[in-house]
Amino acid sequence: MFDHALLFHGYTASMRDYELVVHEHGGAHGTAATRRYLFRYCVEADVSTSLPWSVWQRSLDDRLLDPEPEVDGYVWGVRWQGLYPGAQLVVPSARAALWTDAAGSAFREVRIEAGAHEITLVFSELAVIDIASGYAPFTVPGA
């Protein structure tokens, strides 16, 4: 999970698992694909901005929700962020060790760094699923 486009991240509708939807462009030798990284039994999810204050100060205008705004700042409207430097397993992890001892099942910790967010997850299992482009994580009834 390195140098691809993070399209979405957040807890699933069941509120137990955390997902990342990633478009992998494939590069010179690979095939493009969209994948769902499902971190099952996610007991901790910490998300914070990776953007400095100076960028946030210029990026509060709602016009930046447009993919081609007429103002300067961080363009939220592109609806993706680069996964760079990407994901790294935290070893050793005191947080994962606590959950492993408490739950009696193996837990791991991963840190994911992207263009706008830093995400740290403590989870038990990971499933990687190929999905069709245009995947929506969940829909709101009546919307």
Image (cartoon, grey):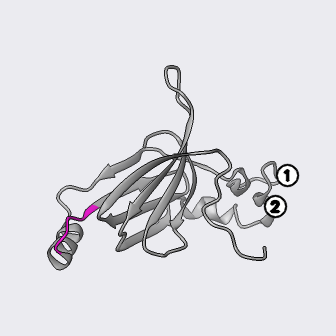
Q: Name the residue nearer the viewer: 127 or 56.
A: 127
Quadrant position of the N terminus in the picture: top left
Residue 31, quarter of picture: top right
Q: Residues within 10 Å of mark 2 (few under 14, many from 20)?
A: some
Please name the residue that numbered disc 2 is placed on: 63
**Can you see residue 53?**
yes
Nearer-the-camera pick, 17 or 87 = 17
Vertical arrangement, residue 2 with respect to residue 105, above or below = above
- Contact between marks 1 and 2 (CB within 8 A): the answer is yes
Residue occupied by mark 1: 70
Is 78 magenta? The answer is no
Residue at left 44%, top 53%?
A: 113
Considering only order in the chain, which callout, 2 or 1, is on the residue closer to the N terminus? 2
Q: Residue 136: x and y, percent?
A: 65, 58
Magenta residues, dominant SS class: loop
| Amino acid residing under circle 1 | Glu
Asked whether the viewer can see residue 24, the reply is no
* Distance from Cα at disc 1 to Cα at disc 2: 7 Å
51 vs 61, left or right, is left
Residue type (three-letter) at the residue carrying disc 2: Arg
Circle 1: element type: loop
Disc 2 secondary structure class: helix
Q: Quadrant of residue 40?
A: bottom left
- What is the x, y in percent for residue 138? 63, 66
The magenta stretch is 104-108
Of residues 129 and 9, the one nearer the viewer is 129
